Amino acid sequence: MADEHLSPLDLAFWNLDSPGHPMHLGAVAVFDRDPERPVDADGLAALLTARAEAVPRMRQRVKDVWYGVGGAAWAADEHFDARHHVHAVRRTDAWAAVAELMARPMDRHRPPWEVYVIEGAPDAPFRILVKLHHALADGLRAVEFGAALLDQGARMPAPASAPASAPAAPRKGAEAAVPAQVRAPGLHLPALPLPDPRQVVASLPDRVREAGRALGIGSAVLRASLDPGGPAALGAAWTPGGAERRFATASLDVDDLHRVRKTSGGTVNDVVMAVVAGALRRWMEARGDDPAGPGPRALIPVARRRRRGVRGGRGNRISGYLLRLPVGEPDPLARLRDVRAGMDRNKDAGPDTGPGAVALLADSVPPLAHRFAAPLLAASARLLFDVLVTNVPMLDVPLTLDGCRMTELYPIAPLARGQSLAVACSTYRRRVHIGLLADAESLPDADTLAAALHGALAELLDACG
């Protein structure tokens, strides 16, 4: 199988990675214990190891390439051993273990994923933490990887395509097509066909439109970076590495969110954003901070359809909206109206414009420039947004692992340098599960903020009558 180049955005994620701010996302699945048998963390780890080995992409690592200087590609890991990636952990405080594990960078010389079986207190549910580098998967792709490890995914027939570790058989006569002067033992050069001049001319209008769009997005990003930042409480220490994390969770009833939506209009996502804004207001007041002034700027990722003809076309393709959360507004229904108005403006403009579409600029940057620009971009994220709020789609069907029922699923978004909070939401079995990953120094009271989410929803429900 030919190596697949990373898409421009995946290459950007790979180069943005640093030891103190690893660019991996994750999810924690909570499972009920089987009353008939004790939890066997080592046995579960062995089961997950076997299932991970059957997923072709999980056998691949990122390697540098000579063609497309500065680029990288997915290639089979000749020394792949899934046991290096799956581990059993025994900790009474399971959420503290999640925070520590999410802070650890992954080995960049191996396939960039890890799975942990976390066995907590004797009578507590057990948890599975899945970590995936953002270059490997976005939220939707992460769900696919996770599902392959569960009982339902394991029962599905294996894909017809050959596994990534098995190279495709060479086409008959293919070697003869390569000039003798470039053939050598161990040297394999890709075919470099000359472009058709007619195709080049025909593509010029698209290239002009893309350049115009990139210029518009760049101008919007510059203007947004000049706007006043959000509350100082959401700014993390600008340290190059070694940052500790806190992880906290909240679970909201979908029926409650729909009740607010039916009363006030908009979408369930609008209600969730208003709940986040209300929770931040409550959290700031509990800390003695004044919520008045410019609200925090939330970056809301938006999934985009994969474009044909883009190298690494199976990779991430996302844009985003930028929304200033109205934490200074004391009226919960007025906060919701402000969120709706802001989201409506974003949707009217579309996901291809505005500062939130900054991820689309990756397509306009040559591979080598990604390597040089990554440190600058990593340090500049705080100038554009204050908090990441993402909604990860989830299969809403009963899921199990080794016969044990999954009851909760908390997604985890990466934490950018200079920021203290990333919020990720996912709906499963009529509950919206929210995972909060926080900088331990700037936001040690993540549990207080998680509890404030429940209070903010209750406040909205009371206001709806």
Image (cartoon, rainbow, N blue to C red):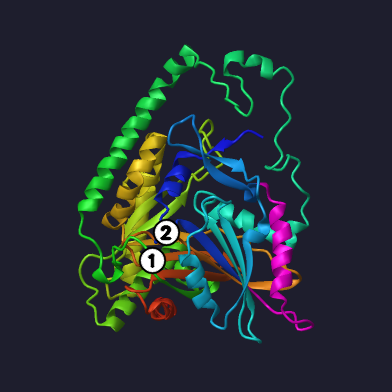
Amino acid type at mark 2 = Pro
Question: Is residue 373 left or right of 203 when viewed as pictured?
Answer: left
In the rendered image, residue 227, in percent from the top left (x then y), is placed at 21, 55
135 or 268, nearer to the observer: 135
Task: Write the residue at 65% across / 45% down.
Answer: 78
In the rendered image, residue 25, in percent from the top left (x then y), is placed at 50, 59
306 or 366, nearer to the observer: 366
Q: Residues within 10 Å of mark 1 (few under 14, many from 20)?
A: few
Picture layout, residue 309 above or below residue 378: above
Residue 54 covered by magenta stretch: yes
Identify residue for label 1.
242
Cβ atoms at labels 2 and 1 below 8 Å apart: yes
Q: Quadrant of residue 31?
A: bottom right
Picture layout, residue 161 above or below residue 429: above
- Label drawn at residue 19: 2
CA separation in Å, label 2 and label 1:
7 Å
Task: Write the residue at 61% across / 85% down.
Answer: 121
Question: Is residue 341 left or right of 457 when viewed as pictured?
Answer: left
Magenta residues, start to end: 30-56
36 or 164, nearer to the observer: 164
Amino acid type at mark 1 = Gly
